[in-house]
Amino acid sequence: WLPSSAPSTALREFRRRWHAAFPGLPGLLGDDPAVIGYHNAMEALLTALGRARSTDGRSGLEAELRRLRLDLPGGSIRLDRNRQAVRDGYLSKIVVHGGKPTLAPVAVVPHVEQTFGGLLSSAPPPGPDSQQCRRGSPPSWAQ
C-alpha cells in the first residue's frame, strides 16, 4: 500500500488515532505498509469476531469474514472466494522534485484481486514447480 491518492476519511482518522496512541513515534511511521497491513488485518478479524455468534465457532467467523466489507485506510476491501483481499490498487510513478524522488499518483485500479484481472492464474503461489510460464495479455487497465 502506498498513500498515492488523496487521503480518505478512513486514512485521516487512522492517522489521527495513530498520533494520539503513539505520540513519541514519528508520524510517518503510521503510513508504513507493515503498520497499515497489520491494522487492516486486525480490523477485519475483530469486526468479524464481533459479528460472529460465539456458538458458531470457526465456521461462524469464516462466514462473517466472507461477508465483510470494510472501509480501511487504504480504501475499501472485501475477500474473494479464496479468502484473498480484493481492493483498489494505486499506480504511481517516481518523479524528482528538488533533487528528491517522490511518488506521483497515476491511476487507481478498482477491485484488484489475486489474479490481477486474469493475468495470473488462480493456481498455488508461484514457486519452482507450481506454475508453468505462459504468454498472456495484460488486463485492460495495464495497457
Image: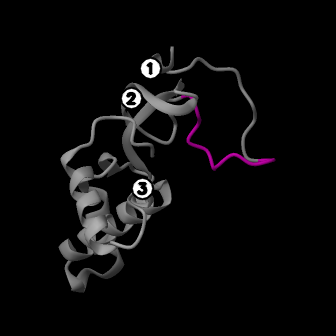
Q: Is residue 121 magenta?
A: yes
Q: Residue 141 shows which numbered tag? A: 1
Relative to the observer, which residue lies in front, 68 or 72?
A: 72
Pointer 2 with pointer 3, Cβ within 8 A? no
Disc 2 target residue: 109
Residue 13 visible within the image: yes
Which residue lies at the image location 26% right of the left edge and 80% below the top edge? 56
The residue lying at 44 percent from left, 40 percent from top is 113
Horizontal side of 141 relative to 64 (left or right) equals right
Residue 31, quarter of the rendered image: bottom left
| Residue kind at label 3, given as amino acid type | Leu
- Magenta span main SS: loop
Q: Dot 1 lies on which element?
A: helix
Residue reaching furthest top?
143
CB-based contact (under 8 Å), mark 1 and mark 2: yes
Q: Position of residue 97 (x, y in %)?
A: 50, 26
Residue at point 44% right, 52% down?
84
Query: Local crowd at mark 1 within 10 Å, few (<14), some, or many (≥20)?
Result: few
Label 2 CA crowd tier, 10 Å (few <14, some 14–19, many 20+): few
| Tag 2: amino acid | Val
> What label sits on residue 28 in the rendered view?
3
Real-space Cα separation, disc 2 to disc 3, in angstroms = 25 Å
